[in-house]
Amino acid sequence: MRKIFLVDDEMAIRDGIGKSINWENEGFIYCGDASDGELALPLIEKHRPDIVITDIQMPFMNGLELSHILREKFPSIKIIILSGHDEFEYAREAMRIQVSEYCLKPVSSQDLLTILQKASAQIDQEEKNEQRLLHLEYQVIQNQQANRDQFLYELCEGLYSFSDAMKKATKLNIPLISEYYYIIISECSLDSTIDWIPRNYSCIRFSRKIRESIFIMLGNSKQQLEQEANSIRKELNEHSKHIELLFGIGRVESRIQGISLSFTEAEEEKNNAKIIQKYRTEDMNKTLESHIDCKQMNRMQLLEFLKTGKVDDINHFSSNYSAFLNSDNIRSQLTIYYFIMDFTITVTHYLKDEESISDNPEIIQKVSHLEHKASWVRNYTDVLNYMENMLKLVLSIRKNKAISYTQTIQLTVNYIQSHYHNSQLSLQTVSDAVNISASYLSHLFSQETGTTLIEYLTNIRIEKAKELLLKTHNKTYEIATQVGYSDSHYFCRTFKKVTGLTTRQYKNQAQKEFFEYVEDTP
């Protein structure tokens, strides 16, 4: 429906026009009126009418002055002038302003309605013409884009000589001249994941299918482009930890003909990554789940040993935990590889969750050194040596951390770890168990550990909940009860507050991180 605004200094005319037409039935909205142009302008800007009906002779600002301003500020508004003066100069000025109609008063409501319908039809036609023009422009742009993408893809396929490539690029207005080139091919679900590449680097971007982007990277220094490619690779690897992303990067090449060589390498890397991802995901799930279901490899046992095991028991534990690998039917290199990865991830997650390595560069270096050795494990003897060295390191870290507690705090920690599943556990019950006042224990615990006792208890319960989420098929309410929460809703809120994730999100993310770790390991 078209909106109508009326400007006339005679109230009787404004009331007469406003009430003489059933606006809604005729397809219009009467959005307002004013007694002169000066008062009308802010109202017109507010209501944005499609058609303005205005008198010529008015105080402060007459209709012609108003029409001049409307034509400059709102060129799409149709202007209908009602005049009581049959003067040539007025009519000529109205024509110059390109008003839609110039009518002499008095005008009947039917005549005015006919004029409004004519103006409305004119607006309809102009809008159709504009849409048609936009559609044509869009088609031209689409055709140009298709021609551009087709040329760039054919260039990457090596179908152009240098001379032909430069001629075609010039015709399509593509800045192709450069001393060195390399190719990046990415496939991801969100464009925002890779939009930073064209913003930060000199490149030409195009695509050949949905979700895929191809970048022809440009530069005048081979060394600079190689450093750039390494930086981009690290950034894309980081993104791939949080979103589904496949990519390949080709080597830096000189000359136009080198583009096809770099493109082939990038495509091979991306395709290989896709195959490896699918293979690892399916095969690893199948392999590891079969062992877990058979209770041949139980991460719960490993976590328990990491927390309470003794150095003298490391050899025995390692042999028992990995015993299934020593059987004749499970000696494949792939199974050993997956076992070592699972073991390593469990250990490093334990250390990070315990905050044992985050602030100690020396420990970080030792752990990283052992992790690198994982790729050299080839047989069962190597497995045992690797496990024993890693477990000795963890137990030594745990021992050093435990020494820092006073005897009272250690007793408190031990009591909480043994009774966290009790929903009635509180500061008072713990203080009673270690035989000191609740207020003194609260102060001492905060001073020694840097956290409150209740926060520590909450973290213990959430860590136990994490284990149960990953290692069992228990329902959320069952896990809540097992870790000391009588109210499952309160448990879910606490879990989200501590981890930033729901229980389902945590379980999904943990599995995803596991596969990403395996993929990134040499």
Image (cartoon, rainbow, N blue to C red):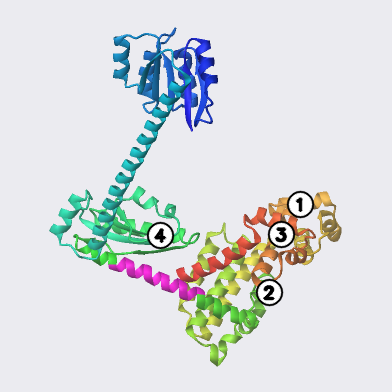
Residue 211 is marked as 4
* Residue found 39% across the figure and 60% down from its top: 210
Please say if the residues under marks 4 and 1 sit with CB atoms less than 8 Å apart.
no
N-terminal-most mark, 2 or 3: 2
Mark 1: give few (<14), some (14-19) or many (20+) Cα within 10 Å.
some
Indicate the quadrant where residue 208 lies.
bottom left
Residue that mark 1 sits on: 444
Q: Are marks 3 and 1 in contact (CB under 8 Å)?
A: no
Q: Which residues are magenta?
A: 264-281
Q: Earlier in the sequence, mark 2 or mark 1?
A: 2
Judge left or right: residue 262 versus residue 512: left
Say which amino acid is labelled 3. Tyr
Q: Decide: few, some or many residues near mark 3? Use Cα within 10 Å; few <14, some 14-19, many ≥20.
A: some
Q: Which mark is residue 405?
A: 3
Nearer to the camera, 269 or 387: 269
Along the polypeptide, which appears first: circle 3 or circle 1?
A: 3
Q: Which mark is residue 309?
A: 2
What's the distance in space between the residues labelled 2 and 3, CA to CA?
19 Å
Identity, as a three-letter code, of the amino acid under mark 1: Leu
